[in-house]
Amino acid sequence: VEMRSVVARAGSVTPRMTLVIVRDITERERVEEMRRDFVANTSHELKTPVGAISLLSEAVESAADDPAQVRHFASRLMAEATRLSQLTARIMDLSRLQSDTDLTDLRDVSIDEVVTSAIESQAIAADSAGIEVVRGGARGLYVRGDVHILSEAIGNLVANAIAYSPAGGRVGVGVKNGDGTVEIAVTDRGIGIPDAEQDRVFERFYRADQARSRRTGGTGLGLSIVKHAVQRHGGVVELWSRPGRGSTFTVRLATVAAPEPTVVKKKRKK
Ligand code: ADP
């Protein structure tokens, strides 16, 4: 429909230009549709914790004479509030990554730094699940990018590898030096993801096998953030997985030359 009306209006415009206009409208519509979906999904997801918080507040109020009950409801209230704030933080991250604005904090980023901070951000989760995170592979590689966004993306992959592994398991974070690229692979020997779900897990709010994954208290936004973060850096994410055997998420990015060490000259005393 759009095509016909544009062609009719365009009149003397050359066919090539018409095509560009049509493509532009289609793209704008697609973006608009994505935005509408995002708002709808988000509102839906926010309803659950908000509803719980309001019910629990009422429960605290009506249990006022029973200190033990008040403490019980108050601690659940705190847990729901924490979950709500994590969810809103992730929604904001994702909406920022989905917007057209350029990444602002670009510099030569050390992959060593990204991996270190990703693993450190999940140290408590790994500890309490009794999971050892083993790191290996190449060192000294750099990419052009935003260190916070990249660290969060790899951190999300490590968090998932821990969450979907059996207690006492092992998670690997390996770095490989390709030809002008770096591969960061996060591997677990956990529950794995069935073939049919492997594309869908990158969709926002999508959670494979609801019953099993709900227990981990996730948001369904982690992998969507990973995908957008990596795409914004011109990279790709690949997934290998077999149910019952585990998963490997591989992020591939173009490398840049290691930055020259900055020499700080001492001021000469006069
Ligand atoms: P969540 O907050 O649910 O972990 P994600 O977007 O990070 O959201 O992941 C989406 C879904 O993909 C998860 O709910 C889970 O079903 C599946 N998944 C992600 N990572 C793994 C993994 N390492 N092993 C098994 N399943 C995974």
Image: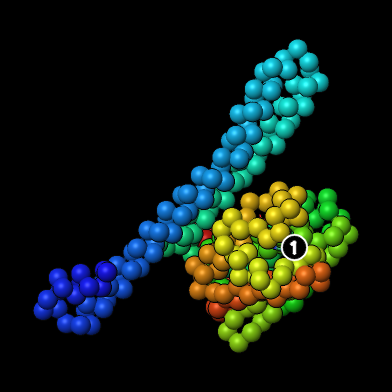
Residue farthest along the bottom direction in this orientation: 179
In the image, residue 49 lies at what x, y percent? Answer: 62, 38
In this rendering, the answer to whether 212 lies above or below 16 is above
Q: Answer with left or right where residue 179 lies relative to residue 70.
A: left
- Looking at the picture, tell me which residue is in the foreground, 99 or 110: 99
Residue farthest along the top direction in this orientation: 65
Q: Answer with left or right where residue 51 lies relative to residue 185.
A: left
> Under 8 Å from ligand 1: the CB of mark 1?
yes
Quadrant assignment for the N terminus: bottom left
In the image, residue 159 lies at what x, y percent? Answer: 71, 58
> Badge 1: few (under 14), some or many (20 or more) residues near its Cα, within 10 Å?
many
- Residue on which the image places disc 1: 161
The residue at 64%/22% (across/down) is 58
- Looking at the picture, tell me which residue is in the foreground, 261 or 224: 224
**Image quadrant, ligand 1:** bottom right
Q: Taking the image as drawn, is residue 226 in sight?
A: no
In the image, residue 158 lies at what x, y percent? Answer: 72, 62
The residue at 68%/31% (across/down) is 77
Check disc 1 and give the amino acid type.
Ala
- Looking at the picture, tell me which residue is in the foreground, 141 or 84: 84
The residue at 52%/50% (across/down) is 41
Q: Taking the image as drawn, is residue 217 in sight?
A: yes
The residue at 49%/59% (across/down) is 97
Residue farthest along the left direction in this orientation: 12
